[in-house]
Image (tube, rainbow, N blue to C red):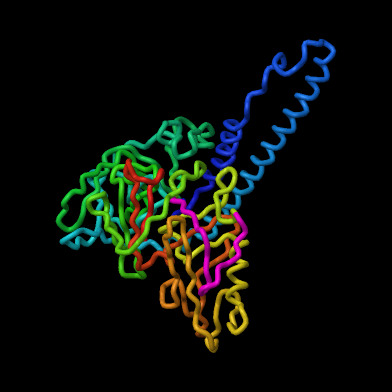
């Protein structure tokens, strides 16, 4: 979620947290089944039960409060980086065997929007200006509720009449219903795909394909591949027949997070600096209670990684080992040691090596060489675009996959 979040997104998190708590509360056992027949035990037994029930509820409410606070941190994180996210989006080149079309077009009727980016965490494709006469989705409609955790948009009841559904993954976009068709340029050969829902904005310059895990596009194609580049235009292959096979790559399982079901979460088993593994505390990179933490991929965050703060400190300490004159995650221009390779090892034996010559290392104006890794204040770890650049990334979500939620291979 590039992805940016509007402020209404913050209102969702407390609702989701409350629903999660409500679903997890176990019904109280009837008093007649837990107390003795002796009438004198009734008062004592009721007191014990009340104390236990209040203790359980207090504990649940504590987790709800933590979930709300986490939601506010996530919102601030996305809001602070939305300008960088917008700059990252580039013209998209659809990959195809035997041809090299110059772009995708989303056709909503009389208006056609050139696709200039992909967002693998957004369930709905965003287009350019809204079609004249197109039908906006009401904020109380089921399609809108799905975007807000099954609940109405929080401000839905506060406006006059039926308000349109604001799209929470991008500023100034609303949800529309109609026939949006995906085409390729310049031959206008149609991709066999129609999107019943899309988000549009009067101020949008083009379209962004939404490939979130539960979205229409991802569920329809079942599999897709993409390759991100540094300023040369990205490439994408849609559908099981077109998705590319990664030579020598190994799949890593995708993990589900009920709080953010459209994200593609993975499990990092270990991180190595050179040949030395970091001593990462057990569970530090796992999805925590109520959907916090975890590791997921993004095609809109223009960094190598946003790394869990605790693990970031370990990486920073490892880069400051004796002999490496490093300042934070940067090596000065006169450093006499070679830059280390940072290796991410995933579940399923998949490996992503961030080598010195890759786009994850950047050179500053003073000659210092810096690793594009920043600490995450939200506890989450995000594998951004610079870690994926130059890699063929293939997602397989089709039914029958040996892994429960599919795989990603790179």
Query: Which sits in the foreground, 317 or 216?
Result: 317
Quarter-wise, where is residue 315 in the image? bottom right
Q: Position of residue 145 (x, y in %)?
A: 45, 34
Q: Is residue 142 left or right of residue 159?
A: left
Q: Position of residue 187 (x, y in %)?
A: 14, 56
Residue at the (29%, 61%) spot, across then down: 235
87 in magenta:
no
Q: Position of residue 10 (x, y in %)?
A: 56, 45
Quarter-wise, where is residue 164 in the image? top left
278 in magenta:
yes
Residue at the (36%, 45%) spot, across then down: 402
| Quarter the C terminus occupies | bottom left
Q: Is residue 220 left or right of residue 186?
A: right
User: Which residues lie in the magenta part?
Assistant: 264-282
Query: Which sits in the foreground, 354 or 156?
Result: 354
158 lies above or below 314: above
Quarter-wise, where is residue 394 in the image? bottom left
Q: Position of residue 340 (x, y in %)?
A: 50, 77
92 lies above or below 46: below
Residue at the (77%, 11%) spot, across then down: 37
């Amino acid at each position: 979620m590039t992805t940016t979040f509007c402020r209404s997104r913050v209102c969702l998190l407390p609702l989701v947290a409350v629903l999660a708590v409500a679903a997890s509360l176990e019904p109280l056992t009837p008093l007649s089944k837990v107390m003795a027949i002796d009438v004198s035990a009734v008062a004592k037994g009721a007191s014990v039960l009340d104390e236990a029930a209040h203790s359980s509820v207090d504990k649940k409410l504590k987790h709800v409060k933590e979930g709300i606070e986490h939601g506010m941190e996530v919102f601030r994180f996305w809001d602070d980086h939305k300008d960088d996210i917008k700059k990252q989006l580039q013209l998209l080149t659809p990959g195809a065997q035997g041809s090299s079309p110059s772009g995708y077009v989303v056709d909503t009727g009389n208006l056609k929007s050139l696709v200039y980016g992909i967002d693998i965490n957004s369930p709905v494709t965003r287009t350019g200006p809204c079609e004249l006469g197109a039908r906006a989705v009401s904020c109380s409609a089921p399609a809108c509720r799905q975007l807000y955790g099954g609940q109405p948009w929080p401000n839905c009841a506060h406006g006059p009449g039926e308000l349109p559904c604001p799209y929470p993954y991008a500023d100034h976009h609303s949800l529309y219903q109609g026939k949006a068709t995906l085409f390729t340029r310049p031959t206008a050969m149609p991709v066999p795909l129609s999107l019943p829902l899309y988000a549009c904005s009067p101020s949008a310059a083009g379209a962004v394909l939404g490939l979130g895990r539960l979205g229409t596009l991802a569920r329809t194609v079942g599999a897709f591949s993409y390759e991100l580049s540094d300023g040369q235009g990205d490439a994408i292959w849609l559908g099981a027949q077109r998705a590319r096979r990664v030579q020598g790559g190994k799949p890593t399982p995708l993990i589900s997070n009920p709080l953010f079901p459209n994200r593609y979460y993975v499990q990092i088993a270990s991180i190595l600096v050179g040949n030395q593994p970091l001593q990462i505390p057990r569970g530090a990179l796992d999805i925590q209670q109520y959907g916090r933490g975890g590791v997921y991929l993004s095609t809109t965050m223009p960094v190598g990684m946003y790394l869990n703060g605790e693990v970031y400190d370990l990486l920073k300490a490892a880069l400051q080992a004796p002999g490496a004159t490093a300042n934070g995650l940067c090596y000065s221009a006169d450093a006499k040691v070679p830059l280390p390779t940072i290796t991410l090892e995933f579940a399923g034996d998949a490996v992503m090596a961030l080598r010195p010559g890759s786009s994850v290392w950047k050179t500053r104006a003073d000659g210092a060489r810096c690793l594009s890794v920043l600490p995450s204040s939200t506890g989450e770890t995000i594998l951004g675009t610079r870690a994926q650049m130059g890699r063929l990334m293939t997602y397989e979500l089709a039914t029958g996959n040996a892994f429960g939620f599919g795989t990603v291979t790179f």
